[in-house]
Structures are given as C-alpha cells and as structure tokens.
Image (cartoon, grey):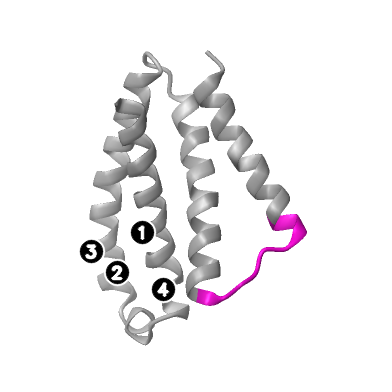
C-alpha cells in the first residue's frame, strides 16, 4: 500500500508543480500572481512530496534512490499529459521514446528487488 500511495502522491505533486509553473501559459490569473502561486502551491506541494517520499522509502526498506527515480518518472508522465491536455502540444517521436524510458525507469525501481 505504501508504494501505491507514494506513486499517487508523486503524480499529484508533480502535476501541481506543472500547474504552478506552467499555468501562466494557460490562465491569465496565474501569470499575474506568481507570489501567491509560489506561497500557496509551494506549501501544498511540499507537504504532498514529503509524504510521497516517506511512503516510498518505507516500501523500499529505507532506500531513498528508488523513490527519487519514481518521482522523476512520475514527473515526466504528468508533464506529458498536462502539456498535451492543456496546451495541445503533441507527442513527437523523441517525446515518445522519453516516455518509454520513464516507464522503464519506474518499472525497474518497482520490479527489481
């Protein structure tokens, strides 16, 4: 259960980071209020990522590296989806290969014990 919670929280945290930093290209209010976004989102994101890290470290018996790679991979996946969905940027061959590598990276961390 710790792994599932960690994966979900990393995805949510990374998605919120995307919204915080790239929302300025989607919504005018985000462009006009960077300080408010930094303070408001920063606290929430930090809290989510602290728990995501805790859950993955517990799942991997105290190891920090697997969670870091999982966080990176979840960031790539959330970035890809949100960039496509909110900004309409397509997936090029290069992006597709990068996505596959991200999925492989996550799979290695989860499946290779």
Query: Sequence-wise, which precedes: disc 3 or disc 4?
Result: 4
Give x and y (percent) for residue 13. Answer: 35, 50
Marks 4 and 1, how far apart at CA: 10 Å
Marks 3 and 2, how far apart at CA: 5 Å
Which label is found at residue 16? 1
Marks 2 and 1, how far apart at CA: 11 Å
Residue indicated by mark 2: 37
Q: Is residue 36 above or below residue 100?
A: below
Question: Where is the N terminus found, in terms of image quarters?
Answer: top left
**Residues at discs 2 and 1 in contact (Cβ within 8 Å):** no
Q: Secondary structure at mark 1?
A: helix
Q: Secondary structure at mark 2?
A: helix
Horizontal side of residue 4 vs 43, given as left or right: right
* Rendered image quadrant of residue 26: bottom left
Crowding at mark 4 (Cα within 10 Å: few <14, some 14-19, many 20+): some
Which label is found at residue 40? 3
Residue indicated by mark 4: 23
Residue shown at 46% from the left, 40% from the top:
71
Nearer to me, 101 or 32: 101
The region drawn magenta spans 87-95
Q: Is residue 94 magenta?
A: yes
């Amino acid at each position: 259960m710790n792994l599932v919670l960690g994966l979900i929280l990393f995805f949510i945290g990374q998605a919120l980071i995307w919204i915080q930093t790239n929302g300025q290209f989607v919504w005018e209010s985000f462009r006009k209020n960077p300080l408010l976004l930094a303070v408001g989102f920063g606290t929430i994101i930090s809290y989510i990522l602290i728990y995501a890290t805790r859950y993955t470290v517990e799942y991997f018996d105290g190891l920090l590296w697997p969670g870091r790679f999982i966080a990176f991979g979840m960031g790539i996946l959330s970035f890809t989806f949100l960039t496509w969905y909110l900004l309409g940027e397509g997936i090029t061959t290069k992006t597709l290969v990068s996505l596959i590598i991200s999925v492989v990276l996550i799979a290695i961390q989860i499946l290779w014990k």
